[in-house]
Amino acid sequence: MTKLTSWAAPTALAALLAACEPSTPGAVVPDPVQVSAPIPVAASAGQSLSDSRATAIVRAARTVAPAVVAVSVRRRERARRRSFFDDYFLPFQETRGLGSGFIVDERGTVLTNHHVIVGATEILVTLPDGRDFDASLAGSDPATDVAVLTLEGAAGLPVAPLGTASDLLIGEWTVAIGNPFGGLISNPEPSVTAGVVSALGRHIIPGEDDDGFYLGMIQTDASINPGNSGGPLVNAVGEVIGMNTSILSRSGGSEGLGFAIPIDRALKVARDLVEHGEAQRAWLGLGVDAVEADGFGRSRGVRIARVTPGSPAAAAGVREGSRLLRAGSSRMATPLDYTAVLLDLRAGDRIELALEGMGAVQLQAAPLPSAAADRVELLRDLEVVTVTPGIQAERGLASAEGALVVEISDALARRIGIAAGDVLLAVNNTRLRTAREAADELRRTQRSGRSFVLLFERGGRIVRTGLLEWR
């Protein structure tokens, strides 16, 4: 239950100050009580006051707020067990969620957070003018927490001006716009809070309830509360510089530690989602770890832990054990700094690495090995690729051979117990070294109608299924 506190705004009393003309000798000065003529400076003073109230923050809010939307979602989730005595499979229940977003083109493309819409069975977007639109999901990326929605039947909508986070200054004004209370407030206009850029390039390590890392984030002390997720962070000239995403808080409310995804990254991911259906990750073929850490866990630098044969890093002559000082324009202090650089890199991009003892090295990023590998369709609902040294390094696999599952339908995953990211190692007692061997062996069991057992790797562990049958 949310406790609402009502504050009555005091009535503003306007005090009008009159400027008297200097009196001349012998002139009769009228009794002030009898003066009833209008004071000529009142209008100009009022205009000056109005101009001074329309600050840069006010103008920025007016510019962007019409394009900020409320995102309402409905989900169908299985109820959680509250005690050991509850049934193991509890019934499904409908839940609701709320977030924010902003419109980036007149046709109704909306950017928001992945965590706002994940698992949604229905998405409704509400504009500040009260109009509702059904929305469809164009794509979503959990790693960067970016999602793209398309509004059905929309045209001529207000658009948020887009800026860049590449030249932000610590201490410059920021405006956070969103819908922190949703349906608890009777009108659909978003809320506005103001603050400054507190820090840049922040890495947030996930807590127990978080799904992943937030890397290279903008930190602001503009208040961000639940429901603001997905809304824009705006600079003083009315340009979107980030997407509000998370807070660090002991109370669950704003404590002046808000974080936003840089708009440059959000737009790259959004473009990938619209054009390709998924984010297009890049690969350099090297892994890093911390040079050393003190008793407080603080890293003292980054070194090259491994270089994959045949990778861009290997072709450039990068050597294992070398200390990595800089990647692009980012200084390398912790391994997370390198991971943050990879998030903004695309296949074909060139990047310069500064290595101790080697100077500057130029690399051209390649597609992820698993994305570039030839896919083999085992069944209508299952595709795999052969594990290679590059794929093993990319995915952190223990197995150097086997068939990596890259796509599987929900129905088949439930039936045989495997998921995308698993590596098929054996069918019954037959070892699988390639995707083609996996295809041949599974099709053989299907044609013969024989029962079978799968051996596969998941998260570095070897898992064996029970006895499976084709139906």
Image (cartoon, helix red, strand yellow):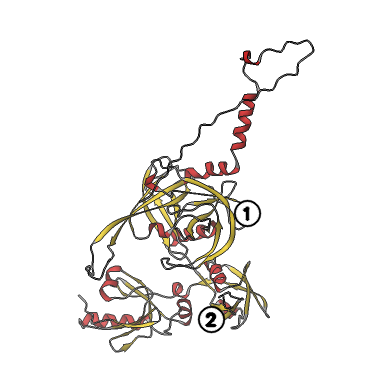
Picture quarter containing residue 448? bottom left
Against 438, is 145 above or below?
above
> What x and y, as percent, mark residue 100?
43, 51
Q: CA distance from mark 1 to mark 2?
A: 45 Å
Regarding residue 153, the answer to whether it shows in the image is: no
Q: Is residue 74 left or right of residue 240?
A: left
> What x and y, as percent, mark residue 353?
63, 73
Nearest the camera: 35 or 236?
35
Against 323, is 8 above or below?
above
**What SS does tag 2 mark?**
loop
What residue is rendered at 55% in x and 29% in y?
A: 13
> What x and y, as percent, mark residue 325?
64, 74
Nearest the camera: 47 or 441?
47
Residue at the spot of label 1: 171
Against 387, is 30 above or below?
above
Count residues near mark 1 (Cα–Cα under 10 Å), then give few for <14, some for 14-19, many for 20+: few
> What x and y, as percent, mark residue 93?
26, 58
Q: Give the residue type at disc 2.
A: Gly
Count residues near mark 2 (Cα–Cα under 10 Å), then give few for <14, some for 14-19, many for 20+: few
Label for residue 310? 2
